Amino acid sequence: MEMFPIILLTVSLQYVQVKSQDAIDAIPTAKLTLVSEWSEVYQSEKVSLQCEIQGSSEAWSYKWYKNGATLQESKPQFNIQSTTKIDSGDYSCQGSLQGRVTTEHSTVVTLTVKAIPTAKLTLVSKWSEVYQSEKVSLQCEIQGSSEAWTYKWYKNRGSLQESESQFNIQSATKIDSGDYTCQGSLQDRVDAELSTALTVTVHARPPAVLTLETEWGDILAGNILTLKCKITDKREWNYTWYENGQELNESLEIYKVTATEETIKSEFKCKGIRTERPLYSALSEEFMANNIVLKRKILLAISGCLVCCIIILIIGCFILKFTRKSEKKDTYRVTEDLFFSVADSKNQTAAPLKEYMENKPTDSEMKECDEKEELFSNCISAVHVDGVIKGP
């Protein structure tokens, strides 16, 4: 009978214990979630972790752990404003309720912080030194990454309107020369490191000069035009000719055109071709035979005038020459006659005097002379006396 109260008391204590266990809540669980979108991030990105005590509205405090080591953080959200490599690790949390109870550790969230990748720029086409109109292709690649990157392209540090991984220049010109770089951008999260520069140099193609090599014989014939295509460098060239944009079956440097009504209105061009780079030269300027025919007519007219002038000038020179010869002969004759006339006059003047000195007058001649002298004296005397001349 004495054992019965003891047994009854034990049963009562067990019941109380059971009843008290039914009244106590289970310890809640801490749940760790990643607020930011990515657990694999690049340096300088922001990361946010959220710790939540499930099924409880109590004012919990929090403990944070990285790789099992306690962190200096007590808020439900743990933020890393700009990640670095040392932020990589396994993160967990637990809640503490006013020193009464502590939750179990949450599940682990692994954070991986990667270095910002570098963009690698490569040349897809064969040459970085190209000639005008050649194609250039550049490829930008983000090394060690499989994310969907967009791309930024730069030329001489100036931004280009291109966002694909490959940058193509379909027909290069001189202004396409420069230093090219590229950079990757990951959904506005982070920009990759700028690539090293790749220099593209665009050379001008050797010029082709189309000239008219028509000779005088061809011009006078009037139906042959000789065209010559010349490349102004020292390489060996073959040639391609075009008439009104259509390629002709001709590969020589010289091309002869028969001047017909059709061909004189055609436009001719040429260029050089070869088996090594540059594979072809620049296209020459157009040549129209119609203009040359007009110029040739003008040239022929001018030439005819010049020939006529030369002939007239030659004839004039001959006439002038013979005229001067005749004048010289006449002058010689006049001089000769004058010489003999002067000589004759001297002889004629000297001859009568000599003859007078040698031939003395006769007595009758002397008597007649005296009579005439007397008569002449009487006449003079009469004039002095009467003032008039009186008749005999």
Image (cartoon, rainbow, N blue to C red):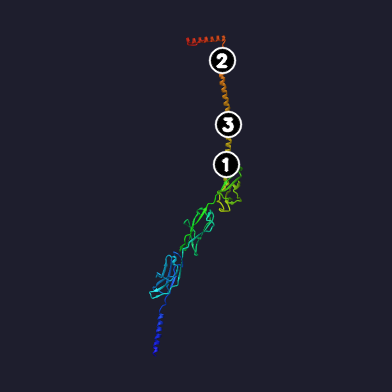
**Crowd class of label 3 (few under 14; some 14 to 19; many from 20; radius 10 Å):** few
**Would you say residue 354 is visible in this rendering?**
yes
Question: Dot 1 lies on which element?
Answer: helix
Q: Determine which quarter of the picture holds residue 82.
A: bottom left
Estimate the spatial distance between the alpha carbons at disc 1 and disc 3, rounded to whole Å: 33 Å
Q: Which residue is mark 3?
A: 321
Q: Which residue is mark 1?
A: 299
Q: Amino acid at mark 3?
A: Lys
Estimate the spatial distance between the alpha carbons at disc 1 and disc 2, rounded to whole Å: 82 Å
Q: Nearer the viewer, residue 76 or 307?
A: 76
Q: Nearer the viewer, residue 317 or 51?
A: 51
Tell me: 333 left or right of 57: right
Question: Dot 3 lies on which element?
Answer: helix
Image marks 3 and 2: residues in contact by CB distance under 8 Å: no
Seen at 40% across and 82% down, the residue is 17
How many marks are shown on the rendered structure? 3
Seen at 39% across and 87% down, the residue is 6
| Image spot of residue 277 (x, y percent) | 56, 53
Q: Amino acid at mark 2?
A: Lys
Q: Quadrant of the N terminus?
A: bottom left
Seen at 58% across and 36% down, the residue is 310
**Please, is residue 191 above or below residue 259 in the view?**
below
Q: Residue furthest bottom?
A: 1
**Please, is residue 17 above or below residue 218 in the view?**
below
Estimate the spatial distance between the alpha carbons at disc 3 and disc 2, rounded to whole Å: 50 Å
**Would you say residue 240 is visible in this rendering?**
no
| Image spot of residue 333 (x, y percent) | 58, 25
Q: Which residue is mark 2?
A: 354
**Please, is residue 206 above or below residue 26 in the view?**
above
